[in-house]
Image (cartoon, rainbow, N blue to C red):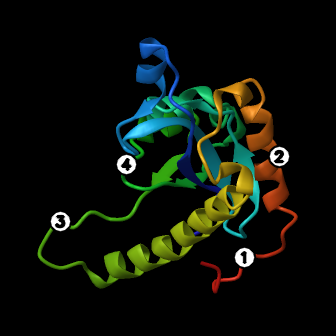
Amino acid sequence: MVFRVILDCTEIAVAAPSSLTLQSETFSHYKNRTTLKGLIGVAPNDLVTFFSPLYTGSISDKEITKISGILPLLEAGDEVMADKGFVIEDLLSGVGAKLIIPPFKRSAQFTKEDTEKTQAIARLRIVVERVIGRIKSNHIWDSSVPLTLTGTVSQIWHNCCVLVNFQGPLSFEED
């Protein structure tokens, strides 16, 4: 399997705004706290090739994929890997790309082909998870981002995403 990009979203904790409207927009039901959310695109060789701006935590993976600017960068025939929570097949088919997700268990047992495909996908999913781990290892993300940084947090995010590409190849001994 050859993939153009592995997509995943991640969330950054932010301080809870006093406005109830802003709280509801930034609240992530997945993380059960107020967050900002970004889309990351990683090449199979562990380079960050795409990152979106940060959006409010309540945005869906599909919506962030739609508005982030990744779709015009894809070409017909590209294969895009994502986890099964990304319901973006219709968005990708609009640009001629194909969504690759782990096979769903259809019967009591996977076929040999499904097992091999699942293992290959799992190895590549580890790559995007490790890259996200590197981005978040910057100590700025150790605690909730204060509201005073909301005007610049996307620039900080941008810098952290770019810096990952200068940290050398991933080591699979990283935690």
| In the foreground, 112 or 108 | 108
Say which label, 4 or 2, has the lower sequence index. Answer: 4
Q: Residue drawn 48% across and 27% down? A: 26
Q: Residue under circle 3? A: 106
Q: Amino acid at mark 3?
A: Arg
Q: Residue under circle 4? A: 85
Q: Amino acid at mark 4?
A: Gly
Question: Mark 4 or mark 2: which is in front?
Answer: 2
Pointers 1 and 4 in contact (C-beta within 8 Å): no
**40 horizontally vs 156: left or right:** left
Q: Horizontal and vertical percent for residue 133?
A: 62, 63
Say which label, 3 or 1, has the lower sequence index. Answer: 3
Say which label, 4 or 3, has the lower sequence index. Answer: 4
Q: Residue under circle 2? A: 159
| In the foreground, 168 or 41 | 168
Q: Residue drawn 73% across and 30% down? A: 149
| In the foreground, 65 or 91 | 65
Task: Work out whether 12 lies above or below 169.
Answer: above
Q: Residue under circle 1? A: 170
